[in-house]
Image (tube, coloured by chain):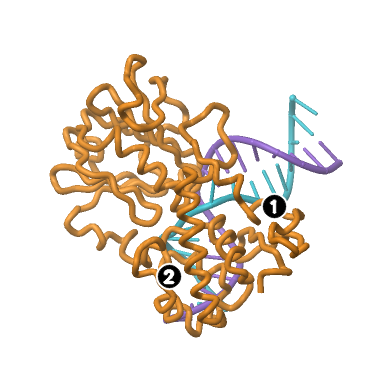
Chain colours: A orange, B purple, C cyan
DNA sequence: ATGTGTTCCTGTCCGC
DNA sequence: TGCGGACAGGAACACA
């Protein structure tokens, strides 16, 4: 599911139920995901209050009382759902709340909060990650240390990007997927941003003019902002509404549209799919140069 | 240093 | 229906 807009949507949905509530009990239902869970995870979560729910790139960061932060990455297939007893007034929580259900196959971590609320992490492919880190030294964590700037923050601007891409012979597509250059973009939003900026995904990163780099920065910011506004993108929808309210997938101009017409007025081109470093890229060869 | 390919894992979809 | 293969929103890691 998740690139930056989806993770931000999840964060906003979880903030109401989680912030200010204590974790009464943590149910750890397997040893780990991509890596083993940290030592004593359940015991270290128990009794902690969630002070703040933040995000860095595609990482959710739940700041807990006692100086530790719970880090969660959703990988490719991770989902988080909130459930409550049937009589709960869900509206006050500001998010979609399910009734409680029996644990399912890929429910790996369940947080039992105050007021009967539960937060469940489900991740079939298990590319996700969970860790606990020292809040005071948050940005020194190995997974966060090397990240580039937030694309919606002030540090991400044309001069930065120009300096970062100078001399790079890799493709524009690969450069934008590189989390050390800019954090939080994934396959979908890279394709969409390059389309909006009129830049070919195959173009060498170091050979994009500064004017066009400025356009790219703007395109990245607007596509992410619009996607967040839409509640992210929901692909491969699960049967029932899963708290996944995103509808930005209807706004894709190129992603998943191989063979379809270019949406740019008067272009007349056809969206193509190519493979770059093992992943699908969608673009319009006639208006992306 | 940089760039590319492989790998982790399950689920779904498509063609035969 | 069943089966095999391709593919999926990520990113660490091993290598040329």
* Circle nearer the N terminus (2, 1): 2
| Left or right relative to A139: residue A95 | right
- Name the residue at 34% across, 48% down: A60
- Name the residue at 51% across, 81% down: A210
Q: Residue A34 carries which label?
A: none
Give the SS element for disc 2. Answer: loop
Determine the residue located farthest toward the left in the rendered image. Answer: A66
Task: Name the residue carrying label 2.
Answer: A181
Determine the residue located farthest toward the bottom in the rendered image. Answer: A167
Few, some or many residues within 10 Å of mark 1 (<14, 14–19, 20+)? some
User: Based on the displayed image, in which of its 4 quarters is residue A53 positioned?
Assistant: top left
- Percent from the top left, x then y, of residue A121? 39, 36
**A161 in relation to A74, above or below:** below
- Percent from the top left, x then y, of residue A242? 49, 31
- Name the residue at 30% across, 30% down: A27
Determine the residue located farthest toward the front in the rendered image. Answer: A265
- Name the residue at 58% across, 59% down: A192
Say which quadrant the C terminus of chain A sits in: bottom right
Q: How many marks?
A: 2
**A197 in relation to A187, above or below:** below
- Percent from the top left, x then y, of residue A89? 32, 20
Q: Which of A34 and A266 is in front in this view?
A: A266
* Separation of marks 2 and 1 at Cα, in angstroms: 27 Å
| Circle 2 or circle 1, nearest the eye | 1
The subunit carrying tag 2 is A
Give the SS element for disc 1. Answer: loop
**A141 in relation to A9, above or below:** below
Q: Residue A257 carries which label?
A: 1
């Amino acid at each position: 599911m998740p690139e930056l807009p989806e993770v931000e949507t999840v964060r906003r949905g979880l903030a109401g139920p989680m912030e200010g509530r204590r974790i009464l009990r943590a149910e750890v239902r397997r040893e780990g995901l991509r890596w083993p869970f940290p030592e004593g995870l359940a015991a270290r979560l128990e009794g902690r209050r969630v002070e703040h729910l933040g995000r860095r790139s595609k990482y959710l960061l739940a700041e807990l009382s006692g100086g530790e932060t719970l880090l969660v990455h959703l990988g490719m297939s991770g989902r988080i759902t909130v459930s409550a007893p049937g009589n709960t007034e869900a509206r006050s929580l500001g998010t979609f709340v399910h009734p409680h259900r029996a644990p399912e196959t890929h429910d790996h971590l369940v947080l039992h909060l105050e007021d009967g609320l539960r937060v469940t992490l489900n991740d079939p492919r298990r590319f996700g990650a969970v860790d606990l880190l020292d809040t005071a030294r948050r940005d020194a964590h190995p997974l966060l240390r090397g990240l580039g700037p937030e694309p919606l923050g002030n540090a991400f601007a044309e001069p930065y990007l120009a300096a970062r891409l100078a001399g790079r012979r890799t493709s524009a597509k690969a450069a934008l997927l590189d989390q050390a250059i800019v954090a939080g973009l994934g396959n979908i939003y890279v394709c969409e941003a390059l389309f909006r900026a009129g830049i070919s995904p195959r173009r060498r990163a170091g050979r994009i003019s500064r004017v066009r780099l400025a356009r790219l920065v703007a395109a990245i910011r607007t596509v992410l902002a619009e996607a967040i506004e839409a509640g992210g993108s929901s692909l491969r929808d699960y049967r029932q509404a899963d708290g996944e309210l995103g509808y930005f997938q209807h706004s894709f101009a190129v992603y998943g549209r191989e063979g379809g017409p270019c949406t740019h007025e008067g272009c007349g081109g056809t969206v193509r799919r190519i493979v770059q470093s093992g992943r699908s890229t969608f673009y319009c060869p006639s208006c992306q140069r």
